Image (cartoon, helix red, strand yellow):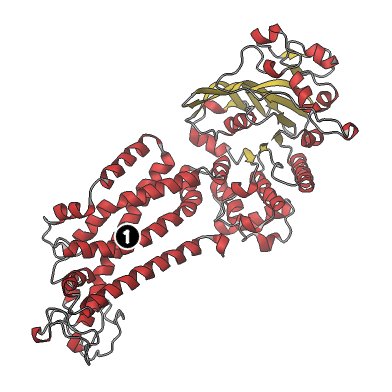
Amino acid sequence: MLLEVRDLHVEFHTRDGVAKAVNGVNYSVDAGETLAVLGESGSGKSVTAQAVMGILDIPPGRISGGEILFQGQDLLTLKEDERRKIRGAKMAMIFQDALSSLNPVLSVGEQLGEMFVVHRGMSKKDSRAKAVELMDRVRIPAAKERVGQYPHQFSGGMRQRIMIAMALALEPELIIADEPTTALDVTVQAQVMDLLAELQRELNMGLILITHDLGVVADVADKIAVMYAGKIVEQAPVHEIYKAPAHPYTRGLLDSIPRLDQKGQALYAIKGLPPNLLAIPPGCSFNPRCPLAQDLCRTDEPPLYDVTESPVPRTSACHFWKECLHG
Amino acid sequence: MVRRLARPAPQPGLHRLRPGHPLPGGHRHLAVPDRLRRPLDCDLSKAQEGSQPGHPFGFNGQGCDVYTRTVYGARASIQVGVFATLGVALLGSVLGGLAGFFGGAWDGFLSRITDIFFAIPVVLGGLVLLSVVTSATVWPVIGFMVLLGWPQIARIARGSVITAKQNDYVQAARALGASNSRMLLRHITPNAVAPVIVVATIALGTYIALEATLSYLGVGLKPPTVSWGIDISSASQYIRNAPHMLLWPAGALAITVLAFIMLGDAVRDALDPKLR
């Protein structure tokens, strides 16, 4: 297994109390596999990724428990200097907004080349040639002419390609893409996702795709982990989830997608708001918004049940997963 | 250094008016005609006289040539302005920048120290600290300005480093394996330096004016040093009878300050690739 996150807990110490952002997350990614992590804003999907990368702001953040095994080694026991050598070289991250993730005062060539200077000790001149090579690889036209240009001179899609090129520069084993297409328009989204998927196949990398866009996930992911209030509430192979969700929250998400055959009808929305992380409700954290909630849900926190009826391994954190699955 | 500049050795055969022209000797001298060479060679019988042939700016209260003194005054005034600004900008941005980047206890400690320095009144502080200094050079005055001036730049540097630090590209650089020093020097500094440059160049004019204030109070530069500040303060009491004595050094001061502010704007524009 390439990456295994075991029972990860992350909390933030704020003036108003302790915000529990991640409460016991388990997931794993194998080489060449794509895991999509799905959830609303504030569900802890980005915080989990930042903990894996080791770029969490500490303080106010704190990893209060769990293990992050990367190629069998627990990253949380490593020294900062050793982790820094892994970042960028063995695991890399693609950010949501490429414009703000590129330094406005350095040319893209300098920023791409920096990867080789930092990790490989390459000279400036050689690193520039490598930068051109990378820009060609992510299919930026006229790479040789554009290598000296600044981020603001590129379009949104091209900037995201540069981010992808930076992440792929040293051919890492794991890529974490944090909502890589959210800031792009729909046609460019498809191009960027195709490029990412193609490069992933080529280099046999593990990919963690963080998103709240169910449409993006369907095409590229192998398995999906749905997060809610810092927990994984359902984990399943991608097609199983679309066919029959085993958690009411997943069902709610799928029902909220506009569909052509529902033209003219009101669009479904999950009622209520995500819980305040300072005061997560007892029992199942989804119970105040759940249409299937019963007394049991308000008192007992559901464990991750194995969905035994499924031919492939999948789990759901709902006491009534059976009812939901046949729902 | 200043004493030598104030009383330069005669340079035979140099009769052209080319202030600031570097001579082959390697020293930077102001080349002025022989008869104007010594700013302290004065003729009391010509005190307060206006413009006349050979003396375009007239004479001051001691009968010294105002043109000569304005040209020589540039040395001390610009020395004070430039070195005080450099000292303040370096000390302030290093301390403030580190405090902003690392945060925590060091940040809290530094912020309280800047509060203490802000509480010291400049003129009163100058009267106390500089009255014990006997040196006639510009360095005690520069040192005093750096001592009281760095907190201003430190606060601005701290603020702009904190702003730049929160940018996504710093997080991105960290995610791609950049070290602390690399993030600070390559990603944060170029994006945080613009406000420091702008404030420092504006402060440069303030330092030249502050030198004038301190000299007026008798604790700044002392004669025989020639500076615009000394001349402005001594001329201010004759403003009704002989306004030309005030006008020329004050005009030189104003133009110099303006020039440095424009320099600051130009430097900031040059550093910002979005304007290229």
Measuring from the top left, give residue A262's x and y in whole percent: 88, 31
**Residue A25, quarter of the rendered image:** top right
Q: Is residue B39 above or below residue B204?
A: below
Residue beneath the point at 74% across and 53% down: A139
Q: Is residue B207 left or right of residue A235?
A: left
Q: Which residue is labeled 1 in the image?
A: B85
Q: Quadrant of the N terminus of chain A?
A: top right
Circle 1 chain? B
Which quadrant of the rendered structure holds the C terminus of chain A? top right
Please state if A321 lies on the left or on the right of B237 as rendered. Answer: right
Residue B129 locus on image (x, y percent):
16, 53
Residue A75 figure quarter = top right
Which residue does the image show at 70% across and 7% down from the upper left? A295
Instruction: Find residue B226 and report its image quarter.
Output: bottom left
Q: Residue at x 30, y 44 (%)?
A: B114
Residue nearest the observer in this picture, B242 or A251 = B242
